[in-house]
Image: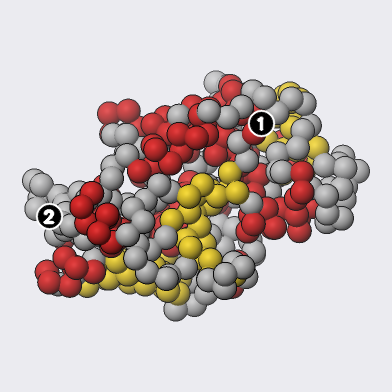
Amino acid sequence: MGMKKAFFRERTMPAIRHMVLEEAGNPAGLVAKIEELDPRFEALLVKTRIMPKQFCATAKPVEGARNCYKYGNYISLKQPATLDEAICQGFDMLMFERSFEQMSHKNEPEIDYVGYSFRQIGGRGAKKLVPFACIPEALRIFVYAEKMTSGIKVRTYATSGAAATSGAVVICEIPSREAERGRYKIRLDHIPVVNNRMITPIALGVISTYAEMPENKLNEIRFSSAGHDIATFYPQEIAAYLAAAKCLMEKTGTTTCPNKVPIEACPFIIPSRRAANFYNKLCNNVIIYDEKAGNTSQMRKLYVAEKCILFGRAIGVLGLNEMRYLNSKRDGKIADYDWSIPQPEAVA
């Protein structure tokens, strides 16, 4: 990845080292320690393993982290197995709660999920992975587009007949996080806009196609032993979905009554303000001891896989409702989330 735009830049590892640095050698209580950090002054040096042991036994830690990201544990959503079940049940608003409940029954150090997964109902499509870190990263892209640009450009194709049975098709142009790159053009198929019996099959059937594939996306598809594709939703695609949902809410609803179906049947968790703040600390206030780091300090910033696991642990420890957007009264407007590097207040 090239030079990031200023909005997406994070504290460097040397800058974090010069903060008030606390050490954490016990994996229990890590979430609480991270939450308690004053992001302006304090930082945490993690001196315990975050990724499962099998991914830490490689000569190159970055390779182990990549393997953890691809092949680590993903929670399977408790979704209808057949089309008939999905049609009878309608959209299950508690799907995520029931699926993530297992995390609350584990000790914090035992929670090692990288993300969650779901499948198209009644089809043979790819198993779809949603790494936890991609969710707040997507929100960061969405907020950047809303605040710093004219927004994510969205073209919708949602004729009444097709939308009811297959969902809407949208083409989005997503800003890059890199300074020298233009926008990515992404097509999303199967975004629900009608609350009918097909809502769940449509929502879980969402697929994305790039006009120009980002470099990190080119290497993400892997194959299961059964030979079926396994695809990952990256931040750009999730950001595209959020922009598409916002657009469709307005276009298929009214001024006084927006259509909430695209967002209520969203297959991606939308982070709360608390979740966004937690993730921002992972990026700007946490480093880890690694004897294979390749520098004299034997410290480094967290790998994406480690951010995923810690974000998942926060869901397990704090509860899904604390980490998922609830309403504007508690969380405010998503576009107002602060993604800047927290700085000490200037002394007058």
Q: Choose top left, top right, bottom left or bottom right for residue 195.
A: bottom left
Please tell me whether mark 1 sits on a helix, a strand or a loop.
helix
User: Which of marks 1 and 2 precedes in the sequence?
Assistant: 1
State whether residue 168 is above or below residue 261: below
Provide residue 258's location: percent of width, then percent of height. 15, 50
Residue depicted at x 55% and y 57%? 5
Residue depicted at x 63% and y 59%? 70
Observer able to see residue 341 = no
Is mark 2 in CB contact (under 8 Å) with mark 1? no
The residue tagged 1 is 109
At label 2, which amino acid type do we have? Gly
State whether residue 67 is above or below residue 326: below
Residue depicted at x 57% and y 73%? 227
- Closer to the camera, 254 or 72? 72
At label 1, which amino acid type do we have? Pro
State whether residue 275 is above or below residue 191: above
Q: State the count of labels.
A: 2
Provide residue 48's location: percent of width, then percent of height. 77, 33
Q: Which mark is residue 253?
A: 2
* In this rendering, position of residue 20 left or right of residue 86: right
Provide residue 346's location: percent of width, then percent of height. 57, 26
- Give the CA distance from mark 2 to mark 1: 45 Å
* In this rendering, position of residue 110 left or right of residue 97: right
Provide residue 211's location: percent of width, then percent of height. 44, 78
* In this rendering, position of residue 91 left or right of residue 196: right
Q: Residue furthest bottom?
A: 211
Please tell me whether mark 2 sits on a helix, a strand or a loop.
loop
How crowded pointer 2 is (Cα within 10 Å; few <14, some 14-19, many 20+) is rated as some
Q: Residue furthest right?
A: 296
Observer able to see residue 26 = yes
- Closer to the camera, 192 or 211? 192
- Closer to the camera, 102 or 291? 102
